[in-house]
Amino acid sequence: MNRDSKYPLLMKSSQAKEGIYQEIIAEDAGWEFLNFNARILKKGQVWKGFTGENEYGIILLSGDYSVKTDQGNWKTKNGRKHVFEGIAHTLYLSRNTEFELTAESEILDIALGWCETTEDHPAQFKEPTKSVIEIRGGDNATRQINSLIEPGFDCQRLVSVEVYTPSGNWSSFPAHKHDERILDNDGNLIEARLEETYFYKTDKPQGYAIQQIYTGDRSLDEIAVARNNDVVMVPKGYHPVVAGHGYNIYYLNFLTGSDQSLANTNDPDHEWIYDSWSGKDSRIPMVSAK
């Protein structure tokens, strides 16, 4: 992972072909694995695709869809109207899968993360009730994490979670990194080498989050102001987030790399904060399964 990229760290949303309003291609990003896009379909529109040598994670942001594949057929029921209403439906498709996804609501908003794979895994359709909710942090660093394609999920490389951070709170904090593969003396994984995207939604159109991306030696040290539908790319280093005061923040993470894992290393300057919290923010959890 490096900064040999055609993209800035902060990708603004744009109107592009076939309803795609965000797209990151691994080759252009200077990455080995991770690709991402987000797209809008109107009722009755069909997205036909073939996964090729990739595994796909399709996350429902809002609306409803039906999907036909050569591995099975599924349909969402009562999908959330927006990301602040409930937990996502998740569809995993392995390599060499043909699919046809049809929008069943007036507007369908979906996100796709994909990467190359050398393995075959079963297609999976994960309903919101199957996602585990984790309340992480404390005080004004409390946030909610919903497992979508969590470590241990039956796939090769993809990981995906969605995170809710209340107004004014910190998230992905104390800061951590996952840019090198580190094992302990017993061969246990301490840190994975992962590429990562942060895809943002805000509960008000003028809302925003501030994200820092920095390395220990500060050879990379940038600040991104992320607004609705923006993507922040994390090529390496630590990457804390804070929600702007007055604005609840959602972000969807896709990660992939050396391991199907979230193993990371904390910034040692901030590890003391773990022992400083006195409680949890009562605004969490922000959403639950419908």
Image (cartoon, helix red, strand yellow):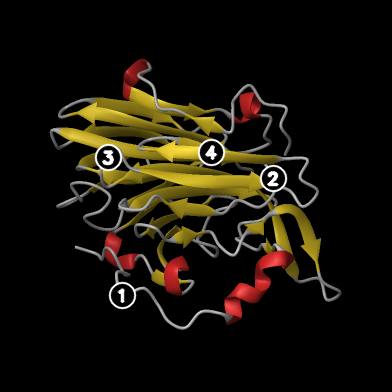
Label drawn at residue 282: 1
Q: Quadrant of the N terminus?
A: top right
Amino acid carrying label 4: it is Ala
Question: Disc 3 designates what residue?
Answer: 67
Q: Residue at x 59, y 25 (%)?
A: 7
Q: Quadrant of the C terminus?
A: bottom left
Q: Is label 2 in a helix, a strand or a loop?
A: loop
Q: Is label 3 in a helix, a strand or a loop?
A: strand
Amino acid carrying label 2: it is Lys
Question: Disc 2 designates what residue?
Answer: 236
Left or right: where does residue 34 sit relative to residue 251? right
Q: Residue at x 63, y 21 (%)?
A: 6
> Mark 1 or mark 2, which is nearer to you?
1
Q: Position of residue 161 (x, y in %)?
A: 45, 56
Label drawn at residue 222: none
Q: Earlier in the sequence, mark 1 or mark 4?
A: 4
Question: Disc 4 designates what residue?
Answer: 224
Quote the CA–CA distance across marks 2 and 4.
15 Å
Quote the CA–CA distance across marks 2 and 3.
35 Å
Q: Is label 1 in a helix, a strand or a loop?
A: loop
Depth check: give the residue in front, 114 or 202.
Answer: 202
Quote the CA–CA distance across marks 3 and 1.
38 Å
